[in-house]
Amino acid sequence: MRVAFIGLGNMGSAMARNLIEAGHEVTVHNRSRAKAEALGPGVRLAESPAEAVRDCEAAVTMLADDTAVQEIVWGESGIVRGLPGGSVHLGCSTISTALARRLAAEHAAIGQKYVSAPVFGRPETAVAKQLLVVAAGEGETVKRCSPVFEAIGRQTFVAGKEPWQANAVKLCGNFMIASMIESFGEAYATLRKAEVGPHLFLDVMAALFGSPVYSNYGRLIADQKFEPAGFALRLGFKDTRLAIETARECASPMPIASLLHDRLLEAIALGMGEIDWSGVAKLSAIHAGL
Ligand code: NAP
């Protein structure tokens, strides 16, 4: 497939590499050119998003947030100016449900397709082609994207016919992970004061819940290994804020999400925005006087 890939951060660089390895014809673009050059000599670089998508069948975006996606899609040389009619913009970034609705409507208005396909998994999971993809959009268009999903992930779930439904799943999923991180922080702080080591507790919890997500985050927090960030705390804050926005749109209160929002905001205020979001657990230790 001819694929354009825009956004070569922690996640995007691994995903683009896997598409190239799977034999797709990939053209890449990144705001800072150095990350595109780092992909290696054989990779086709485009100077702008419009140029990257000019002949593609699918244009993947993996960008930080709503602002970045708006810039890349509707900016001066944005995707909408180059994407051929009938080709699909595949949005993998974690963005708001409101922006996903706007993307679907505005692409459709000029004969382009849009599918939301946010992913679960950290950068090392992306390197290993083991991401979980949650896609939503018109059935036929989602099906057309399956070679991309197969190159980057281990399983794809279809959340519905409206792209924003996939973003709702992603935001609620990250809310579950944030809740788990906060719970680990609180439990470890209490157990440290009870003179029980966090690794013993982690072994018990791993046996109880049996999930790699539990084990991996539990280990990061027990080891207090928050740098380098696999997923920056400022991005985790963004996702919690967006989950609350979606909850508001759906008139569905999420009181724990509101608490997590303030917890992550406090961490940012204390200068922790660039460490891994599991570092929010430091607050529980501080509040326990540790
Ligand atoms: P990252 O390493 O911070 O990369 C962000 C990317 O967005 C970079 O390519 C950056 O370009 C680009 N960007 C930021 N602002 C921009 C702007 N205004 N205009 C153009 N480009 C801009 O982030 P990441 O960890 O790869 O995450 C990317 C997305 O995936 C986010 O939505 C995140 O929530 C989601 N996600 C992350 C993880 C994870 O564990 N890391 C897992 C699942 C989903 P520069 O290189 O020029 O800065």
Image (cartoon, rainbow, N blue to C red):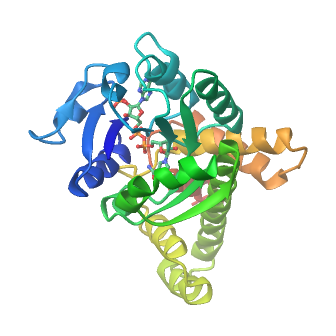
Nearer the observer, 172 or 57: 57
Say which quarter of the image contains residue 110: top right
Please determine whether, in this image, residue 52 is positioned above or below residue 16. above
Give the farthest residue toward the right. 251
Please determine whether, in this image, residue 67 is positioned above or below residue 176. above
Q: Quadrant of the C terminus?
A: bottom right
Q: Residue at x 53, y 41 (%)?
A: 235
In the image: residue 285, left or right of residue 176: left
Does the image show residue 272? no
Q: Residue at x 63, y 46 (%)?
A: 137
Q: Residue at x 44, y 16 (%)?
A: 81
Say which quarter of the image contains residue 152: bottom left
Q: Quadrant of ligand 1?
A: top left
Please determine whether, in this image, residue 39 is positioned above or below residue 52. below
Say which quarter of the image contains residue 237: top right
Q: Position of residue 34 (x, y in %)?
A: 20, 29
Give the farthest residue toward the left. 41
Q: Residue at x 45, y 57 (%)?
A: 146
Q: Count the labels in the image.
A: 0
In the image: residue 287, left or right of residue 79: right
Does the image show residue 180? yes
Q: Position of residue 280 (x, y in %)?
A: 57, 52
Q: Position of residue 131 (x, y in %)?
A: 44, 62
Q: Position of residue 76 (x, y in %)?
A: 44, 9
